Amino acid sequence: MKKIVKDKLPSLWEQLSSQATLFLPVEQDGVVNFAPWEEGDSVNLEALNTVVPPKNVVFPQTETYMRFKVENDKLHIEPFEQNGPYVLFGARPCDVAGITLLDKVFLQEPEDGLYSRRRREGTVISVACNEPDAACFCTSFELEPGMAPGADIMVWDMGDYLLWKAQSEKGEKLTGSVENLLQEAAEEEQKAAMELKERVTAKEAAAAQEMGWDPSGVKETLKDMFDSDIWEQFFRRCLGCGICTYICPTCHCFDIQDYSKDQEGGRFRCWDSCMFADFTLMGSGENPRPTRKERVRQRFMHKLCYYPSNFGLYACVGCGRCVRKCPVNLDIAQVIKEVGGVKSGSE
Amino acid sequence: MSLAQEQAFEPLIVAFCCNWCSYAGGDLAGTSRMTYPANVRVIRVPCSSRVSPNLILRAFQRGADGVLVAGCHPGDCHYVTGNYYARRRFSAMRRFLEYLGIEQERFEVHWISASEGSKFAAVMGEVTEKIRALGPNRKLRDAR
Amino acid sequence: MKQLAEIMKDIAAQSLSRGEVDLVIGWQKGPLWWQSYPAFIEGNEGNGETGSLTWDSFCVPNLSRYLLEELPERKKVALFVKGCDALGFNQILQDKRAEREKVVLYGIPCTGLVDPDKVESAGLGRGLLEVKRDGDELVFVYDSGEQKAQARDFLYDKCLTCRYPNPVVYDQMLGEAAPVQPEERFESVQELEKMDADERFAYWARQFSRCIRCFACRNACPACSCRECIFDIPEPRWLGKANELSETQFYQIIRAYHVAGRCVDCGECTRVCPVNIPLQELNRKFIKDINELYGEYDAGVDPEQEAPLVTYKTDDPAAFTES
């Protein structure tokens, strides 16, 4: 394992950004989000979670992939790519787990070309959590706040320095390119990091224990709950906004649209939200999910029942963003709790 | 802007003109053989109060450097009261755009009657020169 | 405040069991300290759920907006309203989206609600179990004990400038009137007005560039009551779905303009925004200008008074040169 003293981080940012686009958690007006780093940005590695997860790095909110133009009465179409190598530094283990869940969707056959290119071109560096938040519950999904198996490089914040461990070929390669800034980590330093990791996991697991809920059986319970009255108590307070879906590291629904002006334009894909009324609106005017009830149910069924049926894992990583940000506190933790407490077929 | 660019810049002005007064004023300017800059693209609307902020913003998005709404003088509205409402709404809109950092001159409102052909030509000329001096508008434009 | 919660429970149970209303909308407590969310209690005697109603420093969601969805399905609905909720209710009434006789309003005097972000940034969030209001003070409860602090330091900015903490409309008032001590609400607008055009543009462009287009600001707004919103209509699509600055500008300008003269200044837009865009400062610009140009007007105070942008005077001034 290696380490880097924190004084050298500005040099690290400079060096990394000279070889690739460097995404870092950057603070602006009190909001921390991942953004391409520029000299003078205020990098915030302490913030536990960015508002928007780094899924927008591998799956941008808006991505133009084709341009067209009419010239001399002829339509010219050409693919449009803005990609290039990038480094994502500072993703939390839950966020990396979120990307792993997106992989299952986008990299299954037939593979999504835009997504897979972005995944290939990027190196993901995860920073472990030292102190879980009241809204965190990643351990409930068998994740560890101190360890991200899906990251190319894992980093632990040890106060004055960051402990650095390459976990993949890409990670080794990047480590090699910044060797001049790294030092070998001593045995006891490695040990301290591993102890920290265990401590954080235990702490969060204990908090989850205290809350007294266990999502493991929910995916089975929910299979018989499509018509349950339980959705009644949730949907009424939903505002129908898209906060929960856009800040969720595992939500991945998108729409494809064109824009045009005069004789040219482009085709792009952009995030869409199952919470929006027009999400399932069909050309005929028919809408199979006409009210908030069907939409709220869909969101939670997708995360906790349909996705697990398809891929064997819950589509929730316990990052706690919806717990913090839903304006009416309609979060997945409460839903899991309520759903787990109702046995199928009875009320 | 360099001098060469400044000289090459031809502003694009979108003018929403009410059918009953200002558009007719434009017609009078034409039949009277008055000239006004070709930078102005006139769009005929039934009344100045028909111009929703959507139309104004869309014009800016799609490349207008300035937007003008022209209607009947207060008291002369074909629909009796339309321009009274327009006066309030566009006053609020104009100050709001300024608040967002859009130069005030880029959005203008003028009352031009059907008999004011020379005023129509003069206003179009003045607005065009003001916008020419300001330079191209990038602030609300769709950059794609 | 505990006492008020008890009154709320009783009154909700009463009106449901007497069949006066078929739905009560109030607040319930969630498992975490900052969670107090809208609660919907129905049926005879509320199925025993009225006991879960609560009133604390986090009952911030504006309940009047839910009438848009609930009222058409119900005979009569009871609603607890704070000052801002009552203004929102009147606005919905004025926009003809609710019938006064179908609603029972229980007024709640409000002494300001607590912004969880302010608690967190003061470093008081860790291990926090509960926040209680005690007069002008807040009591933060932890496993290890309690800590007191001045409540005003933790209130939402919107509450600090609130001019109507007591409901302007109600059928029954619960509790004694709260003191009215608003700070100047146009200060931020005036600061922005002092900048030059390019600075102002840069300021707003930076704010808008964070917008994720979740539409929470629209969906939380009591003045955004259209049955079908222009931003949702697929054809013609006025608002493109790409997250581009010019599209976001279009959205935010039209949203603010559409509520101009109808915005009750409840500040829910700013509260719900996940990326801290100061949306209330857009709405307040309209309020300030309309006040200056066409006379003082407070949306939501008197539903009989005409809103300033749907009326006129023949001798109105204009913010452009008239000749």
Image (cartoon, coloured by chain):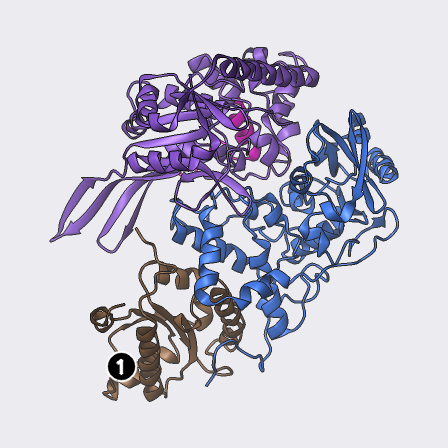
> Is A193 or B130 nearer to us in this picture?
A193
The residue at the point 53 percent across, 48 percent down is: A29
Question: Is residue A292 highlighted in magenta?
Answer: yes
The x and y percentages for residue A323 are: 61, 30
Which residue in the rendered view is the most extreme toward the left? A72
The residue at the point 72 percent across, 56 percent down is: C162
Q: Is residue C238 visible?
A: no
> Is A344 or B136 nearer to us in this picture?
B136
The quarter of the rendered structure image containing the N terminus of chain C is top right
Q: Which chain is purple?
A: A
Position of A1 with respect to C304 (left or right) is: left
> Is B51 or A33 nearer to us in this picture?
A33
> Is C230 or C180 nearer to us in this picture?
C180
The x and y percentages for residue C323 are: 46, 86
Residue wearing tag 1? B36
Q: Please, what secondary structure does the residue beneath circle 1 have?
A: loop
Q: Which residues are magenta?
A: A284-301
Position above or below: C285 against C235: below
Position above or below: C88 against C304: above
Position above or below: A306 against C282: above
Chain C drawn colour: blue
Circle 1 Cα neighbour tier, 10 Å, few/some/many (<14 / 14–19 / ≥20): some
Q: Which chain is brown?
A: B
The x and y percentages for residue C78 are: 77, 42
Q: Chain of mark 1?
A: B
